[in-house]
Amino acid sequence: MVSPKKNAKTKINFIALLSNVDSSIFKVKLNHGFKIENAESELIFKFEDRVYSIASAISHAIKMLQDYKCYNSDETKAYCITNYFYLERDLKTIRGRPIELFDFSQSLVNSYLKPTIQLMRLFREGNICMPLQYFWYLKNNKPKVLARDQKLSYVSPEPYKIEDLELDEIHSFISFTELPFKEKSLQLAFDSFNLSYLL
């Protein structure tokens, strides 16, 4: 019997499926290793089919992609944000979750990615959002869910579309707008603005 390597690590993949977007979303550049990616519809569905252990946890993955509007039928594509990090083999936990996942969620997803998406929505019309988020890894060559988050939101009649002339402005707006707003009344209005997009 071969004992596992002491310093062996497990790669944890993060994927946030985007809704209400089109291919213009690729014009936005993200930091901290986050990447906006696209996949033909068959690849997204193949992904969900391949990771049936994940799909079974949330039931009927394909239907959920449609329900959460993570599939652009006009372009026959789906869009997502991806990233990854590594776990030590001997897991230490906070609230039942690995420390590395807790740190990644707090310092990168909650403190950077979610505010960035909110600022993009504030910048122009359209409810760009991340209704489905997964942390998953491979175990014995089979994908397993480590954590997930799902939230329904208002579906825009038109997709969130970024024009070429807006690129410099939107990147500046994201980079130099600090959240939360220091002025309480402004932050309260911003919170109300974000709540208006939730069902």
Image (tube, rainbow, N blue to C red):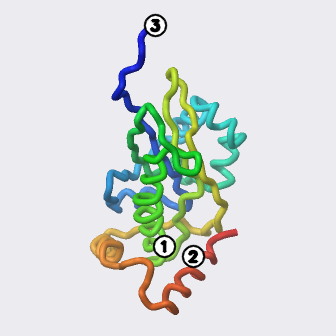
Q: Judge left or right: residue 113 versus residue 131.
A: left
Q: Secondary structure at mark 3?
A: loop
Residue designated by label 1: 121
Which residue is pictured at 43% across the width and 31% down the height? 89
Query: Where is residue 48, by image quadrant?
Result: top right
Nearer the observer: mark 1 or 3; the answer is 3
Say what amino acid the circle numbered 2 marks. Answer: Asn
* Disc 2 element: helix
**Is 25 placed above or below 45 here?**
below
Q: Nearer the viewer, residue 189 or 125?
A: 189
Image spot of residue 190 (x, y percent): 52, 82
Foreground of the two, 47 or 162: 47
Which dot, 2 or 3, sits closer to the camera?
3
Q: Looking at the picture, how far across and down is residue 52, in whole percent?
A: 63, 31
Say which amino acid is labelled 1: Arg
Left/right of residue 60 with respect to residue 190 in the rendered view: right
CA distance for labels 2 and 1? 9 Å
Mark 3, Cα crowd under 10 Å, few <14 / some 14-19 / many 20+, is few
Q: Nearer the viewer, mark 2 or mark 1?
A: 2
User: Disc 3 designates what residue?
Assistant: 1
